[in-house]
Amino acid sequence: MLISLVGVAVGAYLTYAHYTDTQVACTDTGLINCGAVLNSSFSVVLGIPLAVLLLVWFIVFASLVFYKEKGVLMNMWLIVGVGGVAYSTMSMYLIGKVCVWCLSMDVLIILSVILVLIY
């Protein structure tokens, strides 16, 4: 559940930054450049910012964990999360820049998947 709370907090921060055009706390020089990634064409899918999708993913995941859902619904939701990690990784590769906030969300999703599969 702690992973979900951290995910919601980071997702809320990135959503706030997106809608207020606020620079996130991250370097913007060299390989690590959150601004380049978060402002790229990859950062919006079907008109929805990825930050919002991440926020929703962690809220739904927390709800599934709270209600002890371990069936098909949880498995489908985990697949959605892994797909999001793949999309995030691909987009950073294509942009040629790395976003530490995006990577932190990817790590949180991967940890969530591992923990659900273990327990």
Image (cartoon, grey):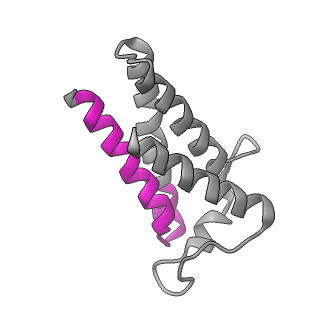
Residue 18 relative to residue 119: left or right? right
At x 49% / y 42%, what residue is drawn? 84
Locate residue 83, reporting x and y percent.
Answer: 45, 38
- Judged from this view, the residue extending furthest toward the right is 20
Locate residue 69, reporting x and y percent.
Answer: 40, 16
Locate residue 93, reporting x and y percent.
Answer: 45, 63
Q: Quadrant of residue 33?
A: bottom right
Front-most of residues 18 and 36? 18
At x 50% / y 26%, what residue is drawn? 63
- Judged from this view, the residue extending furthest toward the top is 71
Residue 49 vs 94, above or below: the answer is above
Residue 76 relative to residue 15: left or right? left
Q: Split into 4 quadrants, where in the image is the C terminus?
A: top left
Viewer can see residue 42:
no
At x 54% / y 29%, what residue is drawn? 60
At x 26% / y 35%, what residue is drawn? 115
- Residues in magenta? 89-117
The secondary structure making up most of the magenta span is: helix
| Residue 111 inside the magenta-drawn segment | yes
Front-most of residues 36 and 74? 74
Q: Split into 4 quadrants, where in the image is the N terminus?
A: top left
Front-most of residues 88 and 12? 12
Viewer can see residue 65:
yes
Residue 96 vs 87, above or below: the answer is below
Locate residue 40, reporting x and y percent.
Answer: 66, 64
